[in-house]
Image (cartoon, coloured by chain):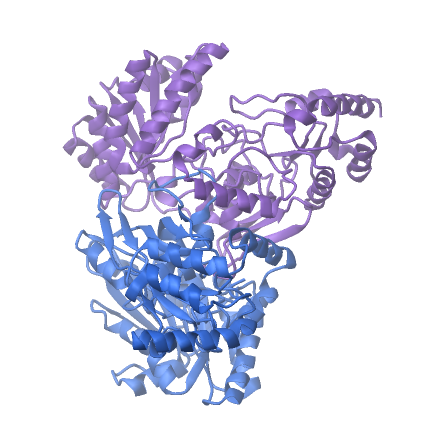
Chain colours: A purple, B blue
């Protein structure tokens, strides 16, 4: 037990120093943690290295101190016990799946408790006839997708992190991805949730039926609530039939990014429906090609890439290519391999490697795409700072990324660019977050989008479901 | 002013007698109502005939006394003033559009205030490029649909009441309809809401973007909340492109209703997607044919009818007909006219005319359709009472209707049949309400479906947003 003992000492020390920062009342005393240790055994981690590893997510937000312990839950009952324990003591709780979040929602609280769902990895059932899957929260998204494909079905939401991120995390953040333009976001496929409330009580939301008007839509309320209303421990999600036929990929190059934006608007308004419709600006294309040379054409301004599916996938791709040419594409290409999408998948690591590190996740109505691209160019010029744009263009969801050196001053300067881009998106009828959530990173932007009454209503709901304010306090809303 | 004076006296009399029944505290005094009269002028109705007319909806629920007044709101500001007035006095409020609800959600409270949105009928904007419509709550559903069709778009949700019901009411109840199997329910097309909270404050939810992860999904929370959390005064809804090509309708007759259920399950699991997929049992077919003779075939057990759309509508209809034959259909027919769907549209008036008056709205997972049809047959036999079934079969959403004479005893006996059918649906993983909502009619069934924690959570949210409990108290949750 020496490791546990050492961890306990470190945890208690941090808790004492951190209670003020967390602002959540009493830190745990040694006796209290011992109680949790008895209940959870080796599923309670107290080793400082583990505490540090479970303190960060994939965002630029940093913890202000170590948590007191990590609960690596093996069951809903573990989560229930941990929350009842934390709630009784007013200890702040952060919740995590694989830690791939980009908004700081899973960063640990100093002196707080971390609940990790990563060990709850059971795919309980693939209900083929009803096209439903029952899963525990820690199931990796790509693994559920693979399990469904064995039955001719698939899991439609495909965040870039799908190979690592968990269903629970996807649901808690209402994750998006490349295929949303065809299949909607994570919220659109969640039928029912098992949730542990702040005080440890376990409840079920939703239904297994396609239609359900019984009571409030708590399923949608918990989806995207970023760990602030309850801990999602299991879910029933809808699966989609794999479209028949050979998918096609397409690519179109533009010398004018606003023309590319207008092409996307026209595609979305037309009858030929892509499954994927992404935009990569010229700067991103250049960086991706340097990162992994594959003979990408060098567009003057931007490239659209995408995929079509179904028996008419080729005709659909041809129709989309024709729309692109009618809106000024200088070159279009269609392939029956996946290769034309590869560049898009490399965008994130390539941009990071080039020092484009500070990104955002704004959305605009698709008719505003040309205007938002023009505006981002003007903002980049005004700040004298490189900005690269990749976008889930078919949804109007953009990820502009700003260059920044690895100093606090550089990050702060890049944040100002992001702030300007965010205000631009809002001025065009947009949103500060299309798919990453608010977490801690975007919380200062909330009042830019939500009116005071909407903020009040959200905080009233938070207070109603988590009266002691232990669940991911101070984030998301 | 003599009518208003008389109405006021009647209202005050009812209020005095009715405050206990409503359980909502102080009734309005004459001075208080005078204040509202000054603020709203002729938009405040007090004539007893109007009070009676605005007291009922289309359900079997009956008011227990007259309301004190009706606010026929012309603007969001009217709603705000009325709610602030009612909240300050603890007066219960019922909310209505066209009064087509089937669950008693819009029935007036004795001594309460009625807020009618029927005069807020502006279609503010059809935003073609973003496929959005901005509408006031009182816009009739079919009128929005017609306005959208002028731009090659349509409004997908199509409750049977679409020619009279309002968008606001559709949203407040999360209405369904025939096309849900293809396009989803009303909740799936609501992008943003304007809501007046119980205390009269006005707020906006959601966004105009396809993806939005900013704050809690209040849009989904208010959708389907049946007037208990706020009053929806305007909405931004998504429109759908009209599919190209000539729609086709199809019909398939079965001698075995369970086989028809299995056919639906197979169709839903297959690649050929209908836009409409309805079931009419043999008893309903017979009654519809008697009501309006059109040469309907007399199926041994049930008929499936539906519609396909798109350039491949005919091939899709043929594929669906083939699935039906493979599952025992004795006759199938495809038409390029709408005629095969007509029978379905006549079902409600025909059944009512034949004394089949007490219906419900249960849902089951589609794989349970055969089992639920078998079980309903057994329940009807056990009670010795005729039950006819029509169903939005593709969604697993059934409307069994039970015969009942026009006496309280007969209604009570029919309700027992409905209770048994509801318990059957729940035992198959179903829901007590697929599209009509809970209102007052189904409230006793809520604990059959929702666990105690889910009920508590819902009531905590209700209390947080409507602390004085004035909005449609005692219903929906």
* Place of residue A319 in the rendered image (x, y in percent of width and height, measured from the top left): 20, 39
Task: Look at the picture and state if A354 lies above or below A343.
Answer: above
Q: Nearer the viewer, residue B262 or B20?
A: B20
Task: Look at the picture and state if A3 lies above or below B340.
Answer: above
In which quadrant is the N terminus of chain B drawn? bottom left
Instruction: Identify the residue at horizontal 27%, vertical 45% (top origin).
Output: A312
Q: Quadrant of residue A282?
A: top left
Task: Look at the picture and state if A183 lies above or below B475.
Answer: above
Q: Nearer the viewer, residue A61 or B242?
A: A61
Residue A114 can be seen in this image:
yes
Task: Look at the picture and state if A15 lies above or below B120.
Answer: above
Instruction: Identify the residue at horizontal 36%, vertical 17% (top origin).
Output: A288
Q: Nearer the viewer, residue A30 or A351?
A: A30
* Place of residue B290 in the rendered image (x, y in percent of width and height, measured from the top left): 31, 88
Residue A333 can be seen in this image:
no
Left or right: B55 as drawn, with respect to A78? left
* Place of residue B285 in the rendered image (x, y in percent of width and height, measured from the top left): 35, 81
Q: Nearer the viewer, residue A284 or A402?
A: A402
In which quadrant is the C terminus of chain B drawn? bottom right
Q: Quadrant of residue B82?
A: bottom left
Number of marks in the image? 0
* Place of residue B364 in the rendered image (x, y in percent of width and height, measured from the top left): 50, 65
């Amino acid at each position: 037990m020496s490791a546990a003992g050492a961890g306990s000492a470190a945890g208690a020390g941090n808790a004492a120093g951190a209670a003020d920062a967390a602002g959540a009342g009493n830190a745990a005393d040694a006796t209290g943690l011992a109680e949790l240790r008895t209940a959870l055994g080796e599923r309670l981690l107290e080793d400082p290295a583990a505490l540090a590893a479970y303190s960060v997510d994939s965002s630029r937000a940093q913890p202000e101190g170590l948590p007191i312990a990590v609960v690596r839950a093996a069951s809903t009952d573990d989560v229930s016990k941990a929350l009842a324990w934390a709630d009784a003591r007013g200890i702040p709780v952060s919740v995590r799946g694989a830690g791939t979040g980009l908004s700081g929602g899973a960063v640990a609280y100093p002196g707080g408790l971390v609940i990790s769902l990563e060990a709850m990895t059971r795919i309980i059932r693939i209900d083929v006839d009803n096209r439903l899957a029952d899963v525990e929260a820690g199931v990796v998204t790509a693994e559920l997708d693979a399990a469904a494909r064995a039955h001719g079905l698939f899991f439609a939401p495909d965040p870039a992190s799908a190979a690592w991120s968990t269903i629970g995390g996807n649901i808690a953040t209402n994750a998006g991805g490349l295929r949303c333009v065809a299949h909607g976001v994570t919220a659109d496929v969640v039928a029912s949730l098992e949730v542990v409330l702040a005080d440890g009580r376990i409840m079920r939301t939703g239904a297994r039926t396609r239609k359900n008007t019984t009571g409030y839509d708590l399923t949608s309320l918990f989806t995207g609530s970023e760990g602030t209303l309850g801990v999602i421990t299991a879910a029933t999600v809808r699966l989609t039939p794999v479209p028949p036929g050979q998918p096609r990929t397409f690519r179109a190059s533009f010398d004018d990014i606003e023309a590319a934006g207008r092409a996307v608007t026209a595609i979305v308004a037309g009858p030929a429906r892509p499954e994927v419709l992404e935009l990569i600006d010229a700067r991103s294309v250049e960086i991706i090609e340097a990162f992994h040379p594959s003979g990408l054409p060098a567009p003057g301004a931007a490239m659209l890439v995408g995929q079509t599916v179904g028996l008419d996938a080729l005709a659909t791709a041809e129709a989309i290519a024709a729309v692109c040419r009618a809106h000024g594409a200088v070159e279009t290409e269609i392939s029956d391999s996946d290769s034309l999408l590869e560049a898009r998948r490399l965008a994130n690591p390539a941009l990071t490697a080039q020092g484009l590190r500070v990104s955002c996740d704004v959305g605009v109505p698709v008719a505003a795409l040309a205007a938002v691209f023009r505006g981002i160019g003007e903002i980049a010029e005004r700040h004298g700072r490189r900005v690269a744009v990749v976008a889930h263009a078919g949804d109007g969801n953009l990820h502009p990324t700003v260059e920044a050196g690895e100093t606090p001053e550089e990050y702060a300067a890049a944040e100002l660019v992001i702030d300007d881009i965010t205000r631009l998106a809002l001025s065009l009828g947009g949103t500060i977050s299309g798919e990453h959530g608010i977490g801690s990173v975007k919380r200062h932007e909330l009042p830019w989008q939500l009116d005071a009454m909407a903020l009040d209503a959200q905080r009233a709901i938070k207070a109603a479901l988590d009266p002691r304010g232990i669940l991911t306090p101070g984030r998301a809303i």
